[in-house]
Image (tube, rainbow, N blue to C red):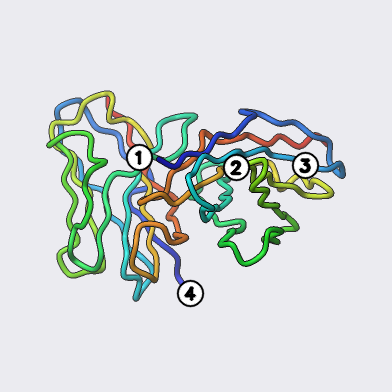
Amino acid sequence: AQSVTQLDSHVSVSEGTPVLLRCNYSSSYSPSLFWYVQHPNKGLQLLLKYTSAATLVKGINGFEAEFKKSETSFHLTKPSAHMSDAAEYFCVVPGGKLIFGQGTELSVKP
Amino acid sequence: GAGVSQSPRYKVAKRGQDVALRCDPISGHVSLFWYQQALGQGPEFLTYFQNEAQLDKSGLPSDRFFAERPEGSVSTLKIQRTQQEDSAVYLCASSLLRGLGQPQHFGDGTRLSIL
């Protein structure tokens, strides 16, 4: 069975500093993986997706993620946080259906 | 273009009442999904439609939950004899392609509160 584990339930950064949101996956083969963002009282928006074409994936709003098979990781990064990045982030694996991680709440301090 | 639209945005009902939640997917999207999101949790899959056919309803928590998409576009999620544990945000998503594993476009959800 496929699954994802988000290692931090909450991350707090200062505006202008780097963001790292960690995700590990469990799969018997190289899966597809997605990152979604959810702003308060809003639905989920696709940030980026990995589908085995390239291990470094660039998404919207300056986010990117690197697929590392040796570490079974798909961490989400951004060089410089903006206040508008404050939201809930979900790592997702399609395993017959979309399987969501528990989410990481990102806070950005001015 | 218009995204996925859900109505109502908020619904308050008394325990035991029936509720109906509506989803208007993106025009032309073949696949439609319903999810339940409890407070502080990730969305949990409820059911999946390909056009008008309900191909997977394995996530529906009980027989009080019923979903339909009779003409392959608008979908309704109905919950009968609501219970307090049904309180959650119900998200609808659609996808242009068939299949459960494609990236999906989400609506803003319906926040259901059962008193």
Among the 4 quarters of the image, the one containing residue B36: top left
The residue where tag 4 is placed is B1
What is the crowding at mark 4: few (fewer than 14 residues within 10 Å), some, or many (at least 20)? Answer: few
How far apart are the two marked residues, 3 and 1, measured between alpha carbons?
28 Å
Q: Look at discs 3 and 1 and give the one toward the viewer.
A: 3
Q: Chain of mark 3?
A: A
In the displayed structure image, the side of residue B73 where residue A66 appears, left or right: right
Residue of label 2: A89
Seen as rendered, the residue at the extreme right is A16
- Asked which secondary structure carries label 1, the reply is strand
Tell me if label 3 and label 4 are in contact, CB under 8 Å.
no
Name the amino acid, label 1.
Gln
Q: Position of residue B34 (x, y in %)?
A: 32, 50
Left or right side of A63 for B1: left
- Quarter holding the N terminus of chain A is top left
* Amino acid tagged 3: Val
- Residues at marks 3 and 4, common chain? no
Residue at numbered disc 1: B36
Residue B10 drawn above or below residue A29: above
Residue at 64% from the left image edge and 42% from the top image edge: A73
Residue A19's disc is 3
